[in-house]
């Protein structure tokens, strides 16, 4: 029987629990070694309270992040809440050491604010309001959330790409970390696309990854690292691009991924489908490749090998085959987009560099170079 993966709790849940415990200890003088909160999903979180530090008019304590079986780099981090009473009323939340600052538009919080998302902020306010009511306290609270070592942890996340500097984000919508890394990737893709739109981009530049980074810089003078990384989720990324109101999309990537799209495969992970050699061979056949070459392509282990065989046999045939594939990639993508997007494509291999580009790709890059590299 397959083992059931264990879920965990978000950094937002940890911050809310630490805040509640600190506020309770501040107002009552009691010690707390555990606290219970209810996450937005309705699930109870019984958090162990660690490293309580009392000041003259404040209490600081921590909850250790446990992401369950999700491969979460923040697991094990201590999420601290430093709570003090305030005469101004209400609950003010800010970030301290190890919590990032937003520097670019399009995220949950505006530039200049701590990267503590709306749901965790709401959770913290609700928990502190409940504590205040229980203790008949009518003042306010100032809360500082901090994560020692958060700057180093953030270097292993998407935060630097998103313009969040100096630390991790305090996030979570349900309060629960589900061990579903694919959903986390999809959420990140959408955040990046939304951010590009907020920055004024009308064309989405999309790539499965950074493979070919040097080639794209040398060939087109563009920084592929500035594109939105869609991983294997090409079809779902097209859906997001259309949903967010972009007018166009340029897909740039290695033939090993993009060839699958020519066959209508919109999730390019090998466990979903892999008929790359069949797709290349059929394109070569349409362009007049002899049967011996077609069989040789079908016996290839990689797209690099298949394209090398094509180029070695007949460079012009190789060019026509690659052009056929790119045309079919665009056709598949435009069909997925319902004809609502102007879509162009650049495909390359490690050994051969540029394999083919669609007719309008160069013009799209030229028209949007500032947004690509900006």
Image (tube, rainbow, N blue to C red):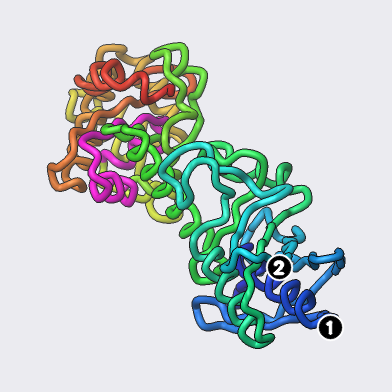
Question: Which residue matches tag 2?
Answer: 85
**What secondary structure predominates along the stretch shown in magenta?**
helix
Q: Residues within 10 Å of mark 2 (few under 14, many from 20)?
A: some
Q: Position of residue 49 (x, y in %)?
A: 79, 74
Query: Earlier along the polypeptide chain: callout 2 or callout 1?
Result: 1
Return the x and y of residue 301 as percentages of the image width and height: 47, 36
Measured as percent of width and height from the top left, residue 360 is found at 20, 21
What's the distance in space between the residues labelled 2 and 1, CA to CA? 16 Å
Residue 182 position (above or below residue 189): below
Image quadrant where residue 363 sits:
top left
Dot 2 falls on a residue whose secondary structure is: strand
* Residue at (81% x, 66% y) in the render: 57
**Is 58 left or right of 113, judged from the image as shown?**
right
Most extreme residue toward the front is 87
The residue nearer to you, when weighing 293 against 74, is 74
Q: Is residue 356 above or below residue 226?
A: above
Q: Nearer the viewer, residue 240 or 51?
A: 51
Q: Is residue 84 magenta?
A: no
- Say above or below: 121 vs 271: below
Question: Is 258 a magenta residue?
Answer: yes
- Quadrant that contains the C terminus: top left
Q: Where is residue 44 shown, x and y percent of the image?
A: 61, 84
Q: Secondary structure at mark 1?
A: loop
Task: Indicate which disc residue 30 carries.
Answer: 1
- Looking at the rendering, the stretch of residues picked out in magenta corresponds to 235-262
Q: Nearer the viewer, residue 228 or 109?
A: 109
């Amino acid at each position: 029987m397959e083992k059931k993966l264990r879920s965990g709790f978000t950094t937002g849940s940890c911050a809310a629990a630490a805040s509640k415990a600190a506020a309770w200890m501040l107002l009552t003088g009691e010690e707390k070694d555990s606290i219970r909160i209810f996450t937005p999903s309705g699930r109870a979180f019984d958090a162990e309270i660690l490293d309580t530090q009392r000041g003259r008019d404040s209490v600081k304590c921590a909850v250790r992040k446990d992401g369950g079986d999700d491969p979460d780099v923040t697991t094990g981090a201590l999420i601290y809440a430093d709570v003090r009473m305030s005469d101004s009323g209400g609950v003010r939340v800010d970030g301290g050491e190890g919590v990032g600052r937003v520097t670019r538009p399009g995220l949950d919080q505006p530039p200049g604010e701590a990267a503590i998302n709306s749901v965790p902020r709401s959770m913290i306010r609700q928990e502190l309001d409940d504590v205040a009511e229980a203790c008949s306290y009518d003042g306010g609270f100032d809360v500082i959330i901090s994560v020692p070592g958060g700057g180093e942890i953030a270097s292993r996340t998407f935060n630097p790409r998103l313009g969040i500097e100096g630390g991790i984000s305090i996030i979570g919508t349900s309060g629960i970390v589900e061990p579903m890394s694919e959903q986390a990737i999809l959420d990140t893709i959408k955040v990046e696309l939304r951010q590009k739109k907020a920055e004024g981009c009308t064309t989405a530049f999309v790539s499965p990854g950074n493979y070919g980074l040097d080639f794209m810089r040398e060939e087109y003078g563009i920084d592929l690292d500035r594109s939105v990384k869609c991983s294997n989720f090409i079809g779902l990324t097209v859906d997001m691009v259309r949903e967010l109101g972009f007018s166009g999309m340029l897909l740039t990537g290695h033939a090993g991924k993009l060839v699958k799209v020519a066959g209508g495969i919109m999730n390019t992970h090998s466990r979903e489908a892999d008929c790359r050699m069949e797709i290349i061979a059929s394109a070569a056949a349409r362009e007049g490749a002899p049967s011996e070459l077609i069989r040789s392509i079908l016996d290839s282990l990689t797209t690099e090998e298949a394209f090398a065989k094509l180029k070695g046999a007949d460079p012009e045939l190789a060019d026509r085959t690659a052009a056929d594939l790119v045309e079919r990639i665009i056709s598949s993508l435009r069909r997925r987009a319902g004809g609502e997007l102007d879509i162009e494509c650049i495909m390359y291999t490690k050994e051969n560099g540029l394999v083919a580009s669609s007719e309008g790709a160069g013009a799209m890059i030229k028209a949007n170079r500032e947004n690509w590299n900006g």
